[in-house]
Amino acid sequence: MTIFRPALEADLRAMYEVFYQTEILDNPHPPEPGDIPSYLHHVLQTGAMYVAELDGSVLAFAGAITRGNIAFLTDLFVLPARQSSQLGKTLLRSVLPQGDLIHCTVSSSDPRALALYIRAGMRPQWPYFVLQLGQPPRTIPLASNVEIIEADADDPELVRWDAQIGGRSRHAEHSYWVRMQRAIPFWFRRRRQTIGYGYIRLGVGTLWHPHISMLGPIGVSTPEDAAVCTLALVKRALEQTNELRIEVPGPHPCLPMLLELGLHIVYVDTFVSTAATPFFDARCYIPSGGDLL
């Protein structure tokens, strides 16, 4: 009989194997599995994780982090041979806390995943574009009146700005980005007034792109400043890396400009939430990624 239980540190390798098998499905030339992603340790330590287990083998797992009144589903993966067997439904119910909370996630393009979240009360809000840089652009248009200044990684104002724009107070994530992902925080300023913040994370990596760096979160006060600040951070990041990834909500003003610069779409996912109105303005905020939002 399949049992559902809280995950343990000793389960992480088996959980990652479930993730790996879903990612390489039907690919004739998969990469090597590599190390367990650090964010799985982070979710286990600061959030909730459950596994579905049969005869000592992990068949599926789910993870979630709750910050304030927002419960974000970080993971839900089921071994390919066990998909469509109700494991995901039970894990989703197990890992997401009940009560007066907003439940949300970034759903993959798999119709079965999207259907599961919709049946659980989450509604599609907008498409979520995963962009990667193929080759460095020749020039990046910038507004001459916007400065980008490296911030002190321990500045509590970063957490406050992120909470105000991103909709959640999450000191644990800021500490994780700096400590485990070599994140460099920046302020955007105009005429000595702060108009936003952003992170370049140099040590992210993915299964398919182990050396890639990532931008985000990026938050600004108004939609009018969103594109120029994002482009300024792209320009700064390209001084340190040629492999770049950024995950952009559909309504964000920078999306067409990033595509014009030569970034290309590698995935189109969907942000879903039980709240009729998202808890952040997608015109002003770029998440840290689909794992922690």
Image (cartoon, rainbow, N blue to C red):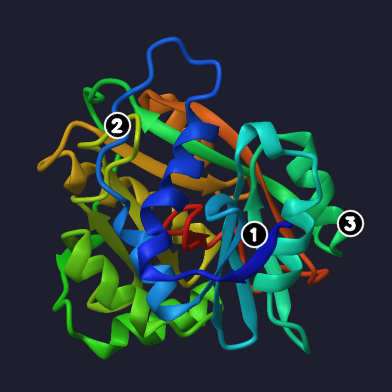
* Residue for point 26% across, 77% down: 175
Q: What residue type is disc 3 on?
A: Arg
Say above or below: 17 vs 10.
above
What residue is pinned by disc 1? 105
Q: Secondary structure at mark 1?
A: strand
In space, the residues marked 3 and 2 are separated at their CA atoms by 33 Å
Give me the C-alpha separation between circle 3 and circle 1: 14 Å
- Do labels 1 and 2 touch, CB within 8 Å? no
Q: Position of residue 128 (x, y in %)?
A: 60, 44
Whether residue 202 can be seen here: yes
Q: Residues within 10 Å of mark 1 (few under 14, many from 20)?
A: many
Under mark 2, the amino acid is His
Q: Secondary structure at mark 2?
A: loop
29 left or right of 104 in image:
left
The image shows residue 98 at horizontal and vertical percentages of 76, 83
Q: Is residue 217 found left or right of 280 in the rendered image?
A: left
Q: Is residue 70 left or right of residue 180?
A: right
Residue placed under numbered mark 3 in the picture = 119
**Mark 3 or 2, nearer chain start:** 3
